[in-house]
Structures are given as structure tokens and as C-alpha cells.
Image: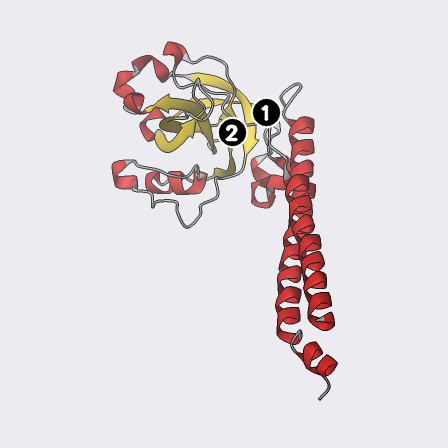
Amino acid sequence: MTASSHKGRSLILPGLAALVALAILVGLGTWQLQRKAWKEDLIAQIEARAYGEPGAILPEADWAAWRADQDEFRKVRVTGTFLHEFEAPVYGLAPGERQGAPIQGYYLITPLQLATGAFVMINRGFVPTDLRDSTRRPESQPSGEVTVTGLVRAPEARNPFTPNDDPARNQWFARDPQAIAAPHKLERVAPFLIDADANPNPGGWPRGGQTPLTLPNNHLQYALTWFGIALTLIGVFTAFAWRRLKG
């Protein structure tokens, strides 16, 4: 076996390792470009749907075919009667006065019964932890017919770190209309929520208008970072192989 052949064989394992690492880096960069396209589409949806005059919600006959990508963030107006006895406080965070210092509290999800007898869950807004109990904010629950303006939202996605809800104690950790409706035997419940706008509620709480409409879009920067590391890897391995073969 010649010396050059031996040196070439010694590059096989490092070369394979470099190829695997390169594939992973290119894959991560490509994934970030896909995320960039998704984020830009979502931003375009928000800009097209969230502003202007409010429309009607999707008719109940079409709820079974409801899709978030076609309807989420649309500005709507709906009229009905709140069932405050079924108010569900969902744990969450709201932006504080200082950036990076969010406030802990709850988003109040309340069934709104429509004239048809169907229900739409309304995210009426945020209350701090000490106002979770409705008796501490008695003005916050208007009776009779009300009109709500807000944005259509998809049910909040759960992840492996989301705690389990405890309906018996009225403790909730995801804004999920069907899950919140189930313990109360509510039927004909819309598959979406409505995030109420910032129109003030009696007594000042809850505070609506909490839907984030400005989304960060740093995916191109991340993609360039991964592709840059991939190019660096190619350069480093090329230099390594050159030295190994010429040494």
C-alpha cells in the first residue's frame, strides 16, 4: 500500500463525519428558510384580516369545516349573553410595563351564548393573579345581551410541558374551547375562540386586546448562520484533508 493510499484511507472516517455534520447544518438552514416563508405568510394573514371593519363569525353550519389558516386573526363582531358561572381562568403571562418582566395571571375564557343557542368561547382578556376570583371584581361580569368585537383565534396548542387541566378546581392551562365546555355539558360550541379587543370592561378588568399582532421574523438570520457554519466546516475539512495528503 502506498503512502498516498494510506493517507487517503485515513480521511474516510473524518470525511463521513464531516458529511453527516454538513447534512445536518444544511438541513437546519433549509428548515429556517421554510420557517421564514411560514412566518411571512402568517404576518400577511394578520395584516389582511386583523384590521378594518369587523365581520360576522363563520356560520354554525360551517364549523365542522373550520380551518385556522383560512380564518384565524379575522376581525369579527358577535352578540350574545355571557354565561359567567362557567368563566374559566386560564393561566398565562401578559406583557409588563418593563420589557422582559411579564405579569403572571389569567386569561378569562367565558362562553357566549348566541341567539341560535350555540356557544362561542370569548377570551375576555387578562387579569392579574389577585383578581382571579370574580368576587374581587364584581363589576367585570355584565349581564344581559352584549356585543363583543375581537379576533378569531385557534385553540391554544398544548405541548409536553403544558400541565393537565383540573376542571373540578377550575384550573386551566390552555385556551381550548372544547375542553373548557366539556365539564359543563355545553354542546354546539365553536371550534375557535374570539380574543376580545381592548374596549374597556366595567371596573377596568379583564383587559382585552392582548393578541400579539407583531411577530419577530429572524429566520433568515438563523438560516444564514447555519449555512455559514456549513461553509466554515467545508473550509476546515478541506484544509485538514490537504494537510493530511501533503504531509
Q: Position of residue 37 (x, y in %)?
A: 70, 42
The N terminus lies in which quarter of the figure?
bottom right
Question: Is 66 left or right of 79, judged from the image as shown?
Answer: right
Q: How many marks?
A: 2
Q: Which of the pair 233/205 is nearer the observer?
A: 233
Indicate the secondary structure of the residue bearing disc 1.
Answer: strand
Give the SS element for disc 2.
Answer: strand
Placement of 101 over or under 205, stated as above or below:
below
- Is 237 or 26 nearer to us in this picture? 237
Question: Quarter of the image holding residue 130?
Answer: top left
Taking the image as drawn, is residue 169 in sight? yes
234 above or below 63? below
Q: Circle 2 sits on which residue?
A: 194
Q: CA distance from mark 2 to mark 1?
A: 8 Å
Type of the residue with mark 2: Ile
Name the image quarter holding residue 136: top left
At horizontal 26% and vertical 19% (from top left) the residue drawn is 135
- Do labels 2 and 1 touch, CB within 8 Å? yes
From the top left corner, tell me how far across and down residue 28 is, in percent: 63, 53
Q: Which residue is mark 1?
A: 76
Tell me where residue 35 appears, x and y as whole percent. 64, 45
